[in-house]
Amino acid sequence: MNLGLPMLPFAVLAAAVFAVSSAMLCAIAYPLLRRIVLGLDSTRRTRVLVVWSMVPLGLSGLLTLLGVLPLGLSLMGCMGEGHTHFCVAHPHLILDERLLWAVYLVLALLMVSALGTQLYGWWRTRCLLNSLATVSHYDRQRGLRVMDCAAPLALTAGLSRPIVYISSSLVTALPSDMLRVIVAHERAHVRRRDGLIQFVAHLASLLHCPWVRRRLLADLSLACEQACDQEAARVVGDPLRVAETLVALARGFTSAKWVPAVGALSFGSGDLVPRIEALLSTAPTPHGVSLPRQVWGVLFPLFLSAAGYAAEPLHRSVEALLGLLSW
């Protein structure tokens, strides 16, 4: 007997229910907790936002796994009579073909749409890199590629091997200290792998509600830019000079037609007002509370134990909910 076949309908429906529930929970919780998240320093905020982008996907996957665990154990003969109702004996609940095919169709359309969007973004990135390679040359002194371009552009492009690009107009027009600010900022993007981080967040956040996802990704982009601004300020030793460079470049970017692709991070992108305010602020940024590793070492086994005990009640709850949906 193929153990996967009886579990598949239940798992698909449970995953759909948990995904919708997780997205709704995040839609309620994120606006309430956003002020706390924005109060973190930019580096920690980036990590928190990346994790938050994965919450619906990760939570629905974990709950689905816990929900099908009793069924899987029953099918393998590893569970006694405690699971007496045995899911495959409820065709009216989990094997309703019309409900299953409707869920399968919706999930298939969503997957195709998401995959198409990501493939289009990847294709745009490849086209961008190919175009930049043909109009740029490597500057050994600065360790970056200079583009033969009149537009004031400075960006980091690429996912696995990010490369810093800067237009020749900036090299010739800007003073050396401002140019140093831009290079330090873009190199911070390379070191932090911000292009790859934002790509993963874009992909993992597809289960969020659209309005929550837009705000979440905008907050993540701002956190990455502010972290690189702070890194540039440490390199040049003058946050005010970084702010002045942002203002100077903003005037140029206003007239330049630039649409960033996936994996491309521009120096002038993002909301400049909070970036400049963060650079000029003298108040220390709250760092939050960190739990010692020993505490995490105790909490993680407790979480696994609680998850194991919750598997059977969670499974019964999913069955009851799916029973309501099948009416």
Image (cartoon, rainbow, N blue to C red):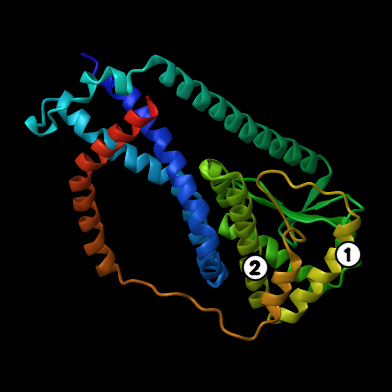
**Label 1 CA crowd tier, 10 Å (few <14, some 14–19, many 20+):** few
Instruction: Name the residue located 64 percent from the left edge and 86 percent from the top edge.
Output: 282
Q: Quadrant of residue 249?
A: bottom right
In three-dimensional space, the C-alpha distance between marks 2 and 1, rounded to whole angstroms, equals: 19 Å
Query: Label 1 belongs to which residue?
Result: 251
**Amino acid type, residue under disc 2 in the picture:** Gln
Q: Quadrant of residue 216?
A: bottom right
Q: Quadrant of residue 316?
A: top left
Query: Label 2 belongs to which residue?
Result: 226
* SS category of the residue bearing label 2: helix
* SS category of the residue bearing label 1: helix
227 relative to 90, above or below: below
Q: Residue 288 at x, y = what percent?
A: 45, 74
One can see residue 80 in this view: no
Instruction: Name the residue located 39 percent from the left edge and 29 percent from the top edge.
Output: 325
Depth check: give the residue in front, 239 or 104: 104
Instruction: Name the residue located 67 percent from the left edge and 37 percent from the top edge.
Output: 121
Q: Quadrant of the C terminus?
A: top left
252 relative to 24, above or below: below
Q: Quadrant of the N terminus?
A: top left
